[in-house]
Amino acid sequence: MSQHTGLKATSFTERGTRHLSHFTTVVIFSAKIITKHDRNEAQQYSKKEDYENCYNDAKHALELDETLINAAILGGEAATKCGKFQGAHSIFSIGLKQNKKDENLIRGLQKLQRAIVDSYDTEDTSEQGYNAVDLCTQSPYPGDDQLLNLEKEILDRRHDIREVPKLPKKEIDPDLRQRAAQAAMAGHKCMIAGKFSEALESFSYAVDIETDNIILRRLRAEVYFINQDPVSAMKDLMHIQKPERSADAWKLGGKLLMEFKLPVLAEFWLRKASEMVKGKDEETAICFQKVRAHRLYDPLTKDMPITVDFTMYGKAIFAVKDIKAGDIVFSDAPMVTTPYVTEDKKQVVKGCNHCGTSLMTARDYFQEKLDNMDATAKEVVENNWPVTKPVVCSECKLVTYCSNICKNTAWERHHELLCPARSKATKKLYDIDQNKGWGTDVDGTWKELWSGHFSIYILAKIWANIAADVKLWMKQDGKDVPEMIHWAKAKAPFRKFIAFGVGSAAKEMPYVLKVMNDIFRDCGDGIKMDITEQELNGRYYQAACNLQIYSDPVTPYHKFYDNLSNFNPEDPKALSILKYLVDKIPSASFAGMFPLHACLNHSCVNNVEVSDGEANGVPGVSVRAKADIKEGEELTTTYIDTTMPRRLRRAWMYKSFNFWCQCPRCQFEGDDAYSCTNCKKRAGDTPFKGCGKCHRAWYCSSECQKINWKEGHKLVCGVAHSKADYS
């Protein structure tokens, strides 16, 4: 089992699906207006060792013109020197798209790898940069008070279990009390010895004498629990009055209620236990999150071969039955989504701003070839390319949808609040997004106002959806002013997404905080939302940890191709179009937050891969088994390109996701030929011999090789790597 994170899981690409890397800190510096002199400005910054400004200017220059290889070299080197490793990789990649053989770019990438590895060598590799349970709240959900009473009734009706009123204390003969004490001691010894039937007899004898002894009741309840008699165990705990229950009693009750499948009541008991120990009992905290995970996700995984559970590393997905390689395990639809503009501008087409449906035209696909086609080929395109009828917002004329249904739904859910025609603030939001985060600050300076590696609209749409739900429930309840319950219910769906990060996005991007507050201070119908620094930071890291890039799996091109398959292969019309078809299909890319997909954890020997898919009738993601998965086995994806060497791979994982990977591949592969992969013995001047199959492990002796092979190397040796796009 891999060491993994409960943070947003990234994914491998089958076709166009990419995950947005999680940057743990954001540093914003002022940048000047980028002109044709940007390369010279960047060079000056580099001489002054002002690496941050050099990187920012070079990055913006490349956004305007990707052919500026010198800007890629300077910006990549500057990002490396100031520790922005993901940024450095991204900017070097832009340059390599222009010239894969450029020696300066290659040297820059090599320096980047050395910098990452050097940082790895200085870290304590046993460290995990977060505690999963600390990232999860135990606060009740809206309506839990009513559900709590309902579950109490169920417990009473189905199992005859209820709170027992305190009985008057009765006098006990000293001799009987002595016998009860002796029986209790005997029961305790039996428990230690694992003789639970005998322990139950001893404790039952003692309880019959001292019916109001809370210690005896708890001990017997524990034995009943071990003997798989939850009803008797719970009845004993109910004899203990609430003020007298210990943390152990509350915890045991929570575990028992988990078995009764009464999640709200189980959470109540476990929350009481946590409060008594002030959160210092990790087992109690994990038990609570296990209850909550099943409560939230069991309805989503119904009829699926998976379940969502909670481990010491966070949420995780496990198989509930055997799954065969190649099977689609599940598909997932986004809770919130927004268009994602790729760096390759030629490959961008329009898609529905609400559901993500591709609106690709024949022009988008064929581009200039459409003008040079012969008459027969043009006729084939005109008659067989699906007709797309984009619908634009009637107010701003800027946002596009696939239908009036999507247009109207989007208006109700978020666009009414965010339409660029609504106010100066919403137009500013739109402009910042279109300019990839750049805009004019309050002092008139052109600078990077938003540095998130995802669209600023994701945060705005989360808040707009919350506001829309508040309006809905407020009106349903006949209220003129929203109540706390309305806000809590509206925010509850987004509590599925765990967030972790360091640094303050709000402090680094103050203009964004101002724009958001300008937009949401009046949401209509008397509703206003105060976007605090804490709120902005929380939503920012929710997006950074959980966003997934995806595209419509069935585009107008695919439908066009299906139409061509109806032609007779010998038909001249079919033959006329073949020479114009190209493999690279432009896509309408979107970034979305997917509730189930977000539970996938990382392993460098992942057993599932994520691709574009369809869920609930709209574009989403599909998770397919890469290998056979047995019942009870965890499903894992990969957050990074696992073809990287182990040392570089683990260092990258720690820098990006705050944990050191302990998956089988990381455990049974080595760093280099000068350290034995099995016993860690250091080589002298002569390197050790490596595994002849994978060349990823080295041994000081044949004995060490045999041991490592048996313990786990045979499981990972030669297993195909996944090249996730983590740029």
Image: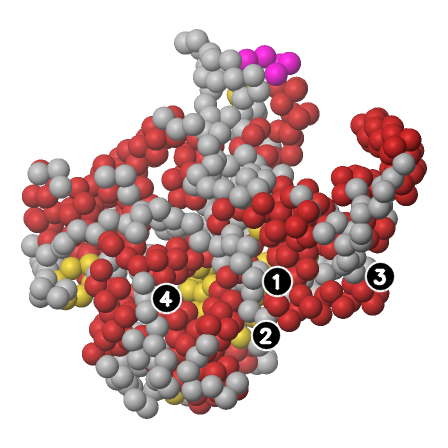
> Relative to 690, is 440 on the left or the right?
left
Q: Residue at x 38, y 67 (%)?
A: 458
In front of the other: 440 or 502? 502
**Residue 725 visible, this angle:** no
Closer to viewer: mark 4 or mark 3? 3
> In the image shown, does 229 or 218 lie closer to the viewer?
218
- Callout 1 amino acid: Leu
Nearer the observer, 29 or 289: 289
User: Does residue 692 show up?
Assistant: yes
Labels 2 and 4: the sequence-earlier one: 4
Task: Give, as a single range, the part of the protein colored magenta.
Answer: 700-704
Between the residue at mark 2 and the residue at mark 4, the CA separation in whole angstroms equals 23 Å
Residue 567 belongs to magenta span: no
> Which residue is under mark 1?
296
> Marks 4/3: CA distance?
46 Å
Mark 3 and mark 2 lie on one chain; the one further toward the N terminus is 3
Tell me if 397 is positioned left or right of 179 in this view.
Answer: left
Mark 1 crowdedness (10 Å alpha carbons): few <14, some 14-19, many ≥20: some
Residue position marked by numbered label 2 in the rendering: 616
Check if mark 2's residue and mark 4's residue have beta carbons within 8 Å: no
Dot 4 surroundings within 10 Å: few (below 14), some, or many (20 or more)?
Answer: many
Q: Which residue is under mark 4?
A: 459
